[in-house]
Amino acid sequence: MPKKFDAIIVGAGQAGPALAGRLTRAGKTVAFVERHLFGGTCVNTGCTPTKTLIASARIAYDMRRAGDFGVRTEGPVSVDMPAVKARMDTVVSDSRNGLEKWLRGMQGCSVYTGHARFESPHEIRIEDSLISAELIFLNVGGRASVPHMPGIDQVPYLTNSSLLKLETLPRHLLIVGGSYVGLEFAQMYRRFGSEITVIEKGSRILGHEDEDVAMEIHRVLEGEGIGFRTSAECIHLSSRPPDIVVGVDCESGDREVVGSHVLLAVGRRPNTDDLGLERAGIAVDAHGYIVVDEELRTNVPGIWAIGDCNGRGAFTHTAYNDFEIVAANLLDGEKRRVSDRIACYGLFTDPPLGRAGLTETQARAHGRPVRIGKRLMTRVGRAVEKGETNGFMKIIVDAETQAILGSAILGVGGDEAVHGVLDSMAAKAPYTTLLRTMHIHPTVAELIPTILGELKP
């Protein structure tokens, strides 16, 4: 007979532990299952380690340009990669261990370590243990996608997870994929000292962003010495010891790029293929994502899917918001829906990109008249003072309703400044409210009202 609980949570990513806390505080017994590392992608192979490495890379970058600020340093700057990795590992392990300790000490929560598989809609087996519950929450996350490109089985390729294990600096890192993950690693390792080439199948990097945003990021990264090969059709890999060769069919340039390492940064896939979902009758889409409704319920009563595995968001903040939606609806009698949230995210290159709402391209596609305000960071006093004038700020407004439709702040502090716009959008305030709000000087955000005062058709 299975051991019965009120709820089972599978996966210790961002949404799962917080949900366990809410359920146990509500008096429910919870079985929490994690087969590998507590903390999920964010803590172990995503936000925490990469932003820690980006911080180290930024220090190296600042030291190299210290002379521009009248600061003298002795000798060339060098990077101790084992020390960089050790710092990253400490930050990651502290976060992971703290989370696991909290869960194991949580009253009403029983932690199981092992691989969870359904045996029926409300029964799950973990190794030799069989447990059941009326409420089941799947928070199993995702992993790097490895495409079936020719030669993939002939080379020792890297993903975002395996690259983080390196203690040596790649001589020449080839990055297949010119989107968010690939570009963050590109700039990071370039600042550590690697030669970098980004290979992108599309005609430009960051195909989901407005062209002006993508081109400015391309310009900045190219200025730091990063090479780009776009329109790279028919990508294939081969080995030429000690190097790796990526063959491309580009509109210009050589037909192959040779490097010491290759990173595949071409997307993610959900960890749903080994859970026995078919035994529970849980529906998945063509890409393996668990199909959910606006309240994150699956097609099977009593089962929810939260976090990256449901295809309704691919970020730590969307996963945590999934938890908030489920908890509010289940425990607080609310009626929150996924469609209520405003799309927002950051690209943590340097300068960072903060994005909220619609892009300019998306806003125009809606067919409504829009007004746009834009200002180069060269005209932002705070950016000039800091010597970081790359990028620009852009805000899109509905010309008829005065609603703010979206914003892109690409520049120093852009990942923080964009929240003022996001909060105004969430409050459904017309742009004039933000226009008339006094901001602190000298900051980047103080230019947002100024930009709104310069809107043009």
Image: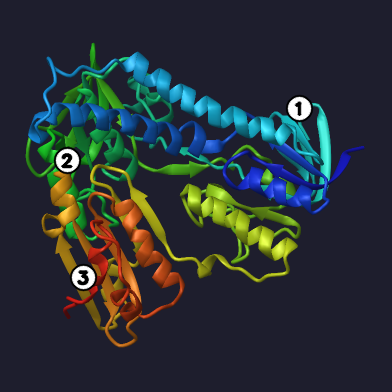
The crowd level at tag 2 (other Cα within 10 Å; few <14, some 14-19, many 20+) is: many
Q: Amino acid at mark 3?
A: Ile
Q: Which quarter of the figure is the N terminus placed in? A: top right
At x 35%, y 51%, the residue is 346
| Picture mark count | 3
Q: Quadrant of residue 271?
A: top right
Residue 192: mark in rendering: none
Dot 1 amino acid type: Glu
Q: CA distance from mark 2 to mark 3?
A: 26 Å
Residue at figure coordinates x 25%, y 79% from the top left:
370
Label 1: element kind: loop
Q: Counting other residues with Cα less than 10 Å from the Cα at mark 3, is it few (<14), some (14-19), or many (20 or more)?
A: some
Residue 193 image point, x, y percent: 20, 23
451 or 366: which is nearer to us?
A: 451
Q: Nearer the viewer, residue 294 or 316?
A: 316
Give percent across and percent down for residue 422.
39, 65
Residue 127, disc? 1
> Element type at marker 2?
helix
Residue under label 3, please give it. 451
How far separated are the C-alphas under marks 3 and 1?
Answer: 59 Å
Amino acid type at mark 2: Leu
Q: Secondary structure at mark 3?
A: helix
